[in-house]
Amino acid sequence: MSKTILITGSTDGLGKEVARRFAVKGWKVLLHGRNPDKGAAVLAELREQTGNDSLAYFNADLASLADVRQLARDVLANVDRLDILVNNAGIGPRHPDSPRTFSADGYEIFFAVNYLAGYLLARELLPLLRKSAPARIINVASLAQAPVRFDDVMLEHDYSDGLAYRQSKLAQIIHANDLASQLEGCGVTANSLHPATLMNTKMVLDSTVLPQSMTTVDDGANALEHLITAPELDSVSGVYFDMQEKARAEDQAYDESAQSRLRELSEILVAKG
Ligand SMILES: NC(=O)c1ccc[n+]([C@@H]2O[C@H](COP(=O)([O-])OP(=O)(O)OC[C@H]3O[C@@H](n4cnc5c(N)ncnc54)[C@H](OP(=O)(O)O)[C@@H]3O)[C@@H](O)[C@H]2O)c1
């Protein structure tokens, strides 16, 4: 059956490949990116390659909470159901001495783009996802994880891109686990995923911090496709997957006080943004 899927960060890498796969299946694929020209080019390319004319492109810079809100409004205005939300867009560690940088709202950029944008987007789209149940929320996280530093969440001390990336990725897993508890019984599941280690995407190829790529975007796309479609996962929620296997994330992901603390902090941050 044809479904509707929103994949953030589908102008490149993993998101683009998974968008292509679901376009081939005839799904209504909502593409997203931050560069209108690149978005238009990817939309045209996928339409041409797949013959699917029910693709759409949405532009929003996830480094701006106002843009995230607008993205949610645009999606709500354009579709009457949403079966799958994939929070995939992300930035990776750049260079060894990259300085701490900030979102439009003044938040540490990795926390803002990789985690907080997905938090707000899921919150804003939840009514539609609930209405569309059974539905799935998938956070594309990583096996690179570091506990959220609640006493220094913007990483004013000991900053490195690597630490910022790892904190944002565990935050995504905590978020999925917290959503899973809150959504229990309503037909919307929330899971998180390490797609594959060091895929050959721009994130890895452009970095001078990360080692050489070890896997392909197809490996990650196989893992994400499994989480999107596997019927045996219909009622699986609150699980972290390492590729296609259920796995254990860092301990903080399962700490209910950390889950509620992150939710409360996120509400404060998005309210200020
Ligand atoms: N690559 C790996 O080995 C690996 C391993 C574990 C987890 N992951 C995770 O997998 C996900 C996809 O990564 P990838 O390797 O496919 O990276 P990628 O090729 O760099 O693609 C990232 C996507 O996110 C978009 N994006 C980045 N910042 C954005 C912003 N501020 N607003 C809107 N969109 C933004 C990019 O847009 P542009 O096209 O404009 O750049 C692109 O579409 C990420 O969450 C990453 O952390 C990757």
Image (cartoon, helix red, strand yellow):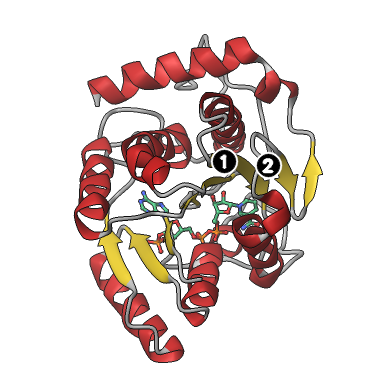
Which residue is depicted at the point 51% across and 12% down?
261
Judged left or right of residue 213, residue 208 is left
Q: Earlier in the sequence, mark 2 or mark 1?
A: 1
Give the spatial CA distance, label 2 vs label 1: 7 Å
Residue type at the position of mark 2: Val
Please tell me which residue lies in front, 95 or 31: 31
* Dot 1 alpha-carbon crowd within 10 angstroms: few under 14, some 14 to 19, many 20 or more: many
Marker disc for residue 230: none
Residue type at the position of mark 1: Thr
Q: Which residue is mark 2?
A: 236
Q: Position of residue 77 (x, y in %)?
A: 19, 54
Identify the secondary structure beneath mark 1. Answer: strand
Which residue is depicted at the point 52% across and 14% down?
260
Does any portion of residue 121 appear in the rendered image? Answer: no
Q: Position of residue 213 (x, y in %)?
A: 71, 64
**Quadrant where the C terminus lies?**
top left
Marker disc for residue 189: 1
Q: Quadrant of residue 191?
A: top right
Q: Quadrant of residue 47?
A: bottom left
Asked if 271 appears above or below 70 in the picture, the reply is above
Please tell me which residue lies in front, 14 or 94: 14
* Dot 2 alpha-carbon crowd within 10 angstroms: few under 14, some 14 to 19, many 20 or more: some
Please tell me which residue lies in front, 109 or 134: 134
Which residue is depicted at the point 59% across and 37% down?
169
Identify the secondary structure beneath mark 2. Answer: loop
Does any portion of residue 208 appear in the rendered image? Answer: yes
Please tell me which residue lies in front, 200 or 175: 175
Q: Position of residue 79 (x, y in %)?
A: 27, 59
Judged left or right of residue 4, residue 60 is left
